Structure formats: C-alpha cells, structure tokens
Image (cartoon, grey):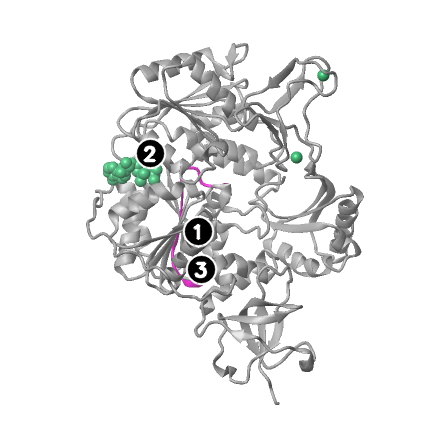
Amino acid sequence: MINPQILKVAIPAVPFFQLFEYLAPENGDNLQAGIRLEVPFGKTSKVAFLLAISSESDFPIEKLKPITRVIDDAPLLAEIDLKLLHWVASYYHHPIGEVMSAAFPVALRQGKEAVIKKLPKSPETEIKTTQLICNEGQQNAIDAVTASLDEFKVFLLDGVTGSGKTEVYMQLIQTVLNRGQQVLVLVPEITLTPQLQQRFQARFSTHIAISHSKITDLQRKNAWLLMQSGACSLLLGTRSALFTPLPNIGLIILDEEHDSSFKQQEGFRFSARDVAVMRGKLANVPVVLGSATPSLESLYNVFLERYQHLPLPERAGNALPPLVQILDIRQQKLQAGLSERLITEIRAVLEKNEQVLLFLNRRGFAPTLICHGCGWVARCVHCDANLVIHRHKNLLRCHHCGTEHRLISRCPSCQSSELASLGQGTERLEFALSEIFSNKTILRLDYDSTQKKGALEDFLTQIHAGEVDIILGTQMLAKGHHFPNVTLVAILDVDSGLFSTDFHSGEKLAQLIVQVSGRAGREQKRGKVLLQTHQPNHPLLNELLREGYAKFAQSELLAREAAMLPPFSYQALLRAHAEKEETPQQFLESVAELARNLNVQNVEILGSIPAPMARRAGQYRFQLLFQHSNRAALQQLLKQLVPQISMLKLANKVRWSIDVDPVDLY
Ligand code: ADP
Ligand code: ZN
Ligand code: ZN
C-alpha cells in the first residue's frame, strides 16, 4: 500500500497532549475532519474525533491500528470550530481530548447518533412584548453594534443596573435574527437563564435553545444539534454552551462579563469571556460584553482602544438610582449579625408592604463550633478548615471536602456540654429573622436551599408574586435578578471582603456591593442600600460610594499598574497536590528549575509555596506562579515547559494542573 491515510484523532477524557494516530479504512476517501470515529484503545474501544488526515506518521506505519468504524457521515464540527478548539487547547495548555470533551454533550461523546429525537414545538406566533423606545445611550449602543455586524469588534456595554442592557441585547438579537443569522447569549449562572428565557420568549417568535449543566443529557444533545444543524437561531446558556457549533453565527453576547463564574475553576480552566472574544474574532462577528461593573481587564481593553465603550449611565424609564449608605456597627449590639438600626429600617419597609433583601455570603448556621470549657474547635481532619454547623440537617460539614459528622452536643475533648456557635451563617440569620419578624414570610436562598430541581424557580416565582417579605441569601442573589418590589437591600458582612490577600478581592467586593445594590428599587420606588461595617472609613468603601464604580476601577487599575499585576502582566498558576507534603513541593521546585533553564527573559517565578489552603481533602497543596509583562513571552515559556513537566520523575506521584489567567489564587 502506498501513502495510506493516517487519521489523527483526539480521544475524549484522555489526558494526553498529542493526537493519536490510526489507519483509515480502505473506502475512507471521503472522511473529513470533524466527524466521530470509533477506535480500538487498549483493550476497549473509544469514541474519537477526527481532527486531521495525513499521509505521514511519526510512528512506523505497521504499528498503527485501523479504526473500528466511522460514526458520522458528515462533520459535526466545521473547520472554524476545530480552529477554535485547537487555539483553546494551546492557549490553556490543556489536553486536546479533554477540550473536545467540553465541546460535546455527553450523548455525542458516547457515540450516540447525531440526530434530533424531539423537534421543538413550532414557536408561539403570539409575541407579547414589543420593542421599547430607546433612550439616547441605548440607541447609540444599538447603532454602534449594528454598524459592525459584518466584522469582528468587541463592545463593552457598560450600563448601571436597570439601565436597559437587556433591551439593547434584544433589539440587536432581533436585527441579527432578521438577517437569518444565529446568536449566542451567555450568562454566568444557571439561575439567570429562566428570567432571560422568559423575556426572550415574550419578544421573539423563534425557538430558544437552552444549554447549561442542569438540563438532561438528551435536552443538551438536542439543543446542540438544533444549533449545529442551523435549525435554531438563538442559544442561551452558561459557559458550557460556548463551544456549540453555530454555522450561521452573527453575534455573541455575554452578560455580566465581570462575573468570575465565566472562568471554569477546575479541570479545563478556560475563561468563557476570553474564548468568546476569540470565537468572535475567528468568526468575524461582533462580541458584546455587558456589565454594570465591568472587569478591570475589559476596562483596560477599552483604555487601549481594543474594545469600544458603550456607556449607559442612567437607569431606564423613571427608576432612580438607589441611595447607598454605610452603617457603622462598631460598638453596636448585634443580633445574629443584624444591628438595631437595620432591624428598624427593615420594619419600616415591611410596614409599607415592600420587600427586603439581605445578603450574607456564608451558608450554614455558623462557621465555627467551639467549646466554652476547653477551647476545642470542630476542625475537618482532611482540610485546614473548620467544620460548619448546619442546624437544619443536624450536621457538621466541611465546605471544602464534603466530610460530614452528626452535630454533637458534648465536647469530644473535655465532655463539656457548653458548645458555642461562633459567627453567622444564612441559617442562623433566617432563624433570628423569624423570631424578630414572626408574622412575616422569610425566604432563604442559598446553595443548600436550592438543591432540589426547580426549587430556585419556585422561589423566584414566590418573590415576584409578592408572597415573600424578607429574602436572605448568598452571592446567588447578587446576580442580575430583577425584584421590582425590593426597596431595601443590606449587606451584613462587608468586612469579610476587605481583608483578603488575593489582589482581586477589592475589585470583587466593589462589584458585589454595586451588584447587590442594583437589586434595590428598580421600578417606581426608590431603593435604599445599607452596608454594615466595622470599617466605616475604609478607603475602598468611601471612594466607591462617593465617586462610583468607574472612578473606583480607575484607581484600582493604577494600583495594579504600580504593582505590575494583571491586567498589566500575565499570570499562570501551576498547582500540585499529593498525600505527602514534600512530594508536591519538590515537584514544583523541579518545575521551577526547568523553567529557569529555559532562559526566558524577565519571567518571574514565584514558589513553590504552600497554597492558601495548604491541606484539602487529605492532600497537601502547593503552587508555583509564573508572571510576565508580555503575554506571548509567557505563552512561549509554557509551550516549552508543559511537555517537559510530564517527564519529570515526580510527575506521576502528584496531581498537577495549569491555570492560565487565574482569577482565584486559592
Ligand atoms: P439591565 O439589563 O441593564 O439591568 P433591563 O433591560 O432589565 O436593565 O431594564 C430595566 C427596566 O427598564 C426593565 O423593566 C425594562 O423594561 C425597562 N426599560 C429598559 N429600557 C427602557 C426604555 N428605553 N424605556 C423605558 N423602560 C425601559
Ligand atoms: Zn471542651
Ligand atoms: Zn474537609
């Protein structure tokens, strides 16, 4: 046989950086990149994605095995999709097989037939809402994006909460749908999909495909195929929807672009925001990033004129901005973290039959169980962490490894029964509120209370129907929700955000305060926001309240520049963990040495140092940080370094991962 066809494939979930090679079947002349194959792999067979066809192999041809069968007649991925996935694998230094896994719904990864089992019902023809008459800011934004529909350009829609960003999205979507093109809309959290879906459904007479991790495999596969085949034009989803093939893509919208949920924090650690921008570039279509509190990266890109700034400085309609005040709680009596002044304010609002929203970013009853007799503290045996008290479930639970114990009533160390719950969690706050406001309806919205399928949707419906007086919850509440009857919002523990060691923490706290504030008084009634703090003179709080988010962001950027931190430099974090303490430490030290020997100029290598939580789930954790003022130089270093890491002696004694552009240094 002369010039046999060599098929280069990626195999899902195989942590291998190279492609695997197989022989094409004899009648395989019309095979194309982008189809799925079944290939022999060890003693089993696996589904593989065909990425390239070549006449040459790095291996002796007689060692290559033929594939088992061809699964698809036509490619599932177009050339442009493959290009994006290759770029992503190389930028994040992640095995191509795992990147491919992320791009496909489970059912297709398993080799199931790529046909749509259930076609959507024909869309309702009745459209319930019509376009609003835009204000000047909205119209400018719409005009700017509309003028660039045939080119790649990134827009930052920088609009205060309630400024009508969603209206801008909807008018743009309508224009792109009218051109017969597809639109991808990404939100950071599953909880934000239902309300946007509703608003879209009321506006567009087209089917809306939904894709996120809480729908069934079958639904996900259907949504994927509807978009991939071009049968559907509008896709709404979370970061996992980003890689859905869109043959007629015309626009990408990413709402709440500052949100760190767009960054996947484990496994394949990609930033959906940054990849969305690259996708827009490859597809030559505009990308609209929207937020009331844009990330410092995006603001810096505006400054560099890489992104076009589209400001919406005012709330749409007649809604007034909320009144934000600092509530000094030094020396104040606190009841489950509530000051008397706050309790009085809550009472006044409830008397007017309006709603209150309280924000406390700690779930459970209390974060610490301590013995009053001897000082013993309930710690997790596997982690450097306290066990959190969960009263409802009668448990002590580790929020880092999931370890659970029954809640105890006697100290295991001195047998004293005087065990105290230190600190406040949402459960405790709920309990205290139900005592203070015994005739009011209180709803707790956190990870624990929303585990049941449909629970969150039910809660949101109850809030909107006015069946709830006080809503309390964690950061889940901070994002994008629209609660028209909420006129008082309070953040109970502002202080916890003021003293973190991560350089992102100031930015995150400011975003949180502004976002939570944005939940107040979004319609006719003016809202009030109270920030409980022991640090009433803290510069961050004062600058933010006096000058607003934009000014805050500007001075934070200056501080980052002075310290040469991102976005003025680029980082990659190498994490490693193992059972024995010295293994990850030594492993990362040899990686650091390898890196130094590569002689890349001006790279900073920090570590190896213990991770901020040095032990988790029984594993010792270390990290090594690379930083460079030039992105390409850092990439060059990683490109040479990563293949060598796997060859290190200790590489198979540790679990290691690389995080390019980390957003959380923990
Ligand atoms: P955002 O997405 O910026 O938070 P929304 O798009 O949800 O803001 O708009 C907030 C409220 O203002 C909604 O009730 C919306 O219907 C209303 N709204 C938006 N644009 C206008 C407009 N041009 N005129 C009147 N009301 C508007
Ligand atoms: Zn004790
Ligand atoms: Zn633990």
Contact between marks 1 and 2 (CB within 8 A): the answer is no
For label 2, the crowd category at 10 Å Cα-Cα, with few meaning under 14, some 14 to 19 and many 20 or more, is: few
Q: Which label's residue is closer to the chain start, 3 or 2?
A: 3
Q: Label 3 amino acid?
A: Lys
Q: Which residue is mark 2?
A: 461
**Of 591 and 104, which appears nearest the observer?**
104
Q: Give the image location of residue 577, x and y in percent.
A: 71, 45
* Residue drawn at (57%, 82%) of the image: 5
Q: Give the image location of residue 33, x and y in percent.
A: 50, 73
Query: Residue lying furthest bottom in this view?
Result: 1
- Residue 457 lies, with reference to residue 528, above or below; the image says below
**Of 257 and 16, which appears nearest the observer?**
16
* Residue drawn at (35%, 22%) of the image: 469
Q: Which residues are magenta?
A: 281-296
**Of 659 and 298, which appears nearest the observer?**
659
- Residue 321 lies, with reference to residue 65, above or below; the image says above
Contact between marks 3 and 2 (CB within 8 A): the answer is no
Q: Which residue is mark 1?
A: 216
